[in-house]
Image (cartoon, grey):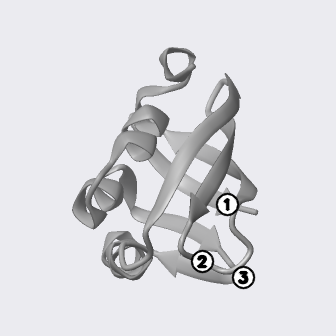
């Protein structure tokens, strides 16, 4: 599945630390998750440090891309209210980095 996705998306999905996630983004990248926005690598790093406190497993269900956009659907199962949940990740890319990610 991930071999058909852009490298930046593959790196994001495979990241195991907040630092690895933040490094996938452009310097002024934007992540939108749970009605909150996280602008810039420092803010994205802090967001992912909070997310890292939750234990969960992420399974990729589908993925597609065209040009500088990609979409991935994942199932997250873990220690959080509403588990399991299926989420859509919409990526806007800038070169080999993520410029914008919206999770819904």
Which residue sits at x=66%, y=45%? 74
For mark 2, what is the residue? 80
Judging depth in this view, the residue of 40 and 2 nearest the camera is: 2
For mark 1, what is the residue? 102
Q: Is mark 1 on a helix, strand or loop?
A: strand
Q: In the figure, residue 20 lies in which quadrant?
A: bottom left
Which residue sits at x=64%, y=84%? 36
Residue 63 on image: x %, y % = 68, 29
Residue 13 on image: x %, y % = 45, 43
Which residue sits at x=61%, y=46%? 92
Which residue sits at x=72%, y=82%? 35
Q: In this view, does 32 lie above or below 35?
A: above
What whole-number distance in Å separates the C-alpha atoms at marks 3 and 1? 10 Å
For mark 3, what is the residue? 35
Q: In the figure, residue 66 lies in which quadrant?
A: top right
Contact check, label 2 and label 1, Cβ < 8 Å: no
């Amino acid at each position: 599945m991930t071999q058909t996705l852009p490298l930046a998306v593959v790196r994001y999905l495979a990241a195991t630390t907040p630092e690895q996630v933040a490094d996938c983004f452009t310097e002024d990248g934007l992540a939108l998750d749970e009605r909150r926005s996280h602008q810039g690598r420092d803010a994205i790093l802090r967001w992912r440090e909070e997310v890292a406190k939750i234990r969960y497993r992420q399974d990729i269900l589908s993925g597609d891309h065209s040009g500088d956009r990609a979409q991935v659907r994942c199932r997250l199962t873990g220690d959080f209210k509403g588990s399991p949940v299926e989420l859509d990740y919409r990526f806007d890319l800038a070169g080999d980095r993520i410029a914008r990610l919206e999770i819904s």
